[in-house]
Amino acid sequence: MTTIHKTALACLAGALLLGTPAMSAAQTAEPKPALPKDDGEKRILEAIAEARKGQRYANVSDADGRLMRQLVEAVNAKRVVELGTSTGESGLYFSLALRKTGGKLYTYDIDPGRVEVAKANFKRAGVEDLIVVTLGDAHETAPKNTEPIDVLFIDAEKPGYDAYLRELLPLVRPGGLILAHNMHTPAPNPRYVEAVTTNPDLDTSFLLMDGAGLGVTLKKR
Ligand SMILES: C[S@@+](CC[C@H](N)C(=O)[O-])C[C@H]1O[C@@H](n2cnc3c(N)ncnc32)[C@H](O)[C@@H]1O
């Protein structure tokens, strides 16, 4: 018997012992639902689950939201700016991190109805003190605040992504992140993709591309 045949037989025997199909055991790792560490986190996760039962408007998926929380907490963000509040689902994920970093979310939306729902969701989660919501066209309202930004999240109208980047990149601190939703579905704004992939001051990856897709861009130090 050749070495290749012996190795294949050993793999098959191992898989049978584990009671799993021959190819799947070593190939995939599936995430489990987020587990609350404390009562505050439990309340936020329950508010997210409740919000998902209502009307949804291309809000972030659970996988997107959890990655965003991980990034915000990892960079110890004090100031997160979000373009496109909608009903507040992404804001709730950010709040999981911000209650630990001592930071705040500044979030902008043009739709008064969605903003009202978002505020109610933030209250239900007990995180309304961590979030400042501004109603209006974010191209006009967001650049008015000129404090340095640790994490910028772009999730408003798709044709505006490149303009948002131009308007707010100067405020993102060196070492800060720009996150951009829908880099896969719906089709991303090509001017934005060009801007974040051809600038030597930036380094960009596209993650979770089996779903909506999240652009993660580091503004280099
Ligand atoms: C995809 S939703 C945001 C979803 C949200 N980030 C979430 O995951 O829960 C896009 C939002 O952008 C808002 N929007 C569109 N154009 C805008 C503009 N010029 N200024 C501010 N918000 C805008 C819409 O009203 C909509 O609520």
Image: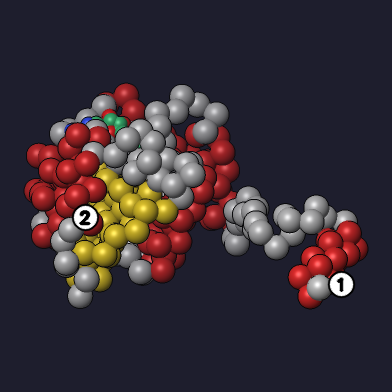
Secondary element type, mark 2: helix
Return the residue found at the far front: 1
Please state which of residues 123 and 94 is positioned toward the viewer in this rendering: 94
Badge 2: residue crowd in 10 Å (few <14, some 14–19, many ≥20): many
**How many marks overall?**
2
Residue occupying image coordinates x 17% and y 37%: 160
Residue at numbered disc 2: 196
Residue occupying image coordinates x 32% and y 65%: 77
- Asked if residue 120 is positioned above or below residue 128 in the image, the reply reads above
| Residue 200 visible at all | yes
Q: Which label was assigned to residue 143?
A: none
Is disc 2's CB within 8 Å of ligand 1? no
In the rendered structure, the answer to whether residue 85 lies left or right of residue 148 reads right
Residue 7 pos. (x, y %): 79, 71
Residue occupying image coordinates x 12% and y 40%: 139
Residue 186 pos. (x, y %): 35, 33
Secondary element type, mark 1: loop
Image quadrant holding the C terminus, namely bottom left
Residue at numbered disc 1: 1
Q: In the image, which is nearer the foreground, mark 1 or mark 2?
A: 1
- Asked if residue 15 is positioned above or below residue 162 in the image, the reply reads below
